[in-house]
Image (cartoon, grey):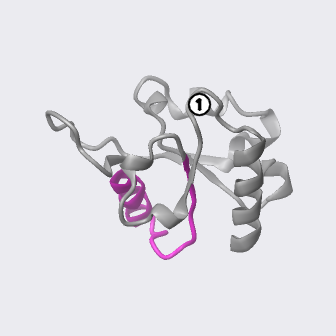
């Protein structure tokens, strides 16, 4: 699907970034798409207990640090409770289905809207 949107870049906010390097994560993508995986979000300090919107905060921190705070972005995530301010940018998937037909259609629609 990313091949249909050549201007889209990927930043990984998955918990996998805590266990794998950026290069290892890139290897999970087809070779022709690996260069478009441009980073991973910073890992927020752990606080004992439940912390809503931590993932959203990590995304916002990455955008600010990379000078891209004003650029359009979308998040594909299975944890909607991790988003409060920018739920309109969230495309929610289900952890056991991931990128199914429904999610792919939503993502394609939203990517077409941002260019």
Q: How many labels does the image show?
A: 1
Counting from the top left corner in percent of width and height, residue 38 is at: 59, 49
Q: Quick one: label 1, few (<14), some, or many (20+) residues within 10 Å?
A: some
- Visible in this render: residue 115? no
Residue 11 belongs to the span the image colors magenta: no
- Visible in this render: residue 44? yes
Residue that lies at the very extreme toward the bottom in this rendered image: 70
The residue located at (84%, 50%) in the rendering is 3
Which corner quadrant of the image does residue 65 belong to? bottom left
Name the quadrant of the C terminus.
bottom right
Which corner quadrant of the image does residue 75 belong to? bottom right
From what the image shows, is residue 2 above or below residue 18?
A: below
From what the image shows, is residue 54 above or below residue 50?
A: below
Is 94 situated left or right of 62 in this image?
Answer: right
Residue that lies at the very extreme toward the top in this rendered image: 19
Task: Pick the residue in front: 75 or 30.
Answer: 75
The magenta segment is 56-76
Q: Name the element at disc 1.
A: helix
Counting from the top left corner in percent of width and height, residue 8 is at: 70, 59
Task: Pick the residue in front: 73 or 97.
Answer: 97
| Label 1 sits on residue | 25
From what the image shows, is residue 15 above or below residue 93?
A: above
The residue located at (22%, 41%) in the rendering is 45
Counting from the top left corner in percent of width and height, residue 112 is at: 77, 68
Task: Pick the residue in front: 35 or 12.
Answer: 12
The residue located at (69%, 38%) in the rendering is 99
From what the image shows, is residue 44 above or below residue 21?
A: below
Residue 73 belongs to the span the image colors magenta: yes
């Amino acid at each position: 699907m990313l091949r249909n949107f050549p201007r889209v870049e990927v930043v990984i906010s998955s918990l996998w970034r805590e266990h794998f390097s950026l290069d290892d994560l890139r290897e999970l993508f087809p070779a022709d798409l690996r260069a478009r995986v441009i980073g991973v979000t910073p890992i927020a300090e752990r606080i004992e207990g439940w912390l809503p919107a931590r993932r959203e905060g990590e995304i916002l921190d990455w955008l600010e640090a990379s000078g891209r705070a004003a650029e359009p972005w979308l998040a594909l995530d299975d944890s909607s409770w991790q988003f409060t301010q920018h739920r309109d940018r969230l495309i929610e998937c289900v952890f056991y289905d991931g990128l199914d037909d429904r999610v792919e259609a939503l993502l394609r629609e939203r990517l077409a809207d941002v260019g």
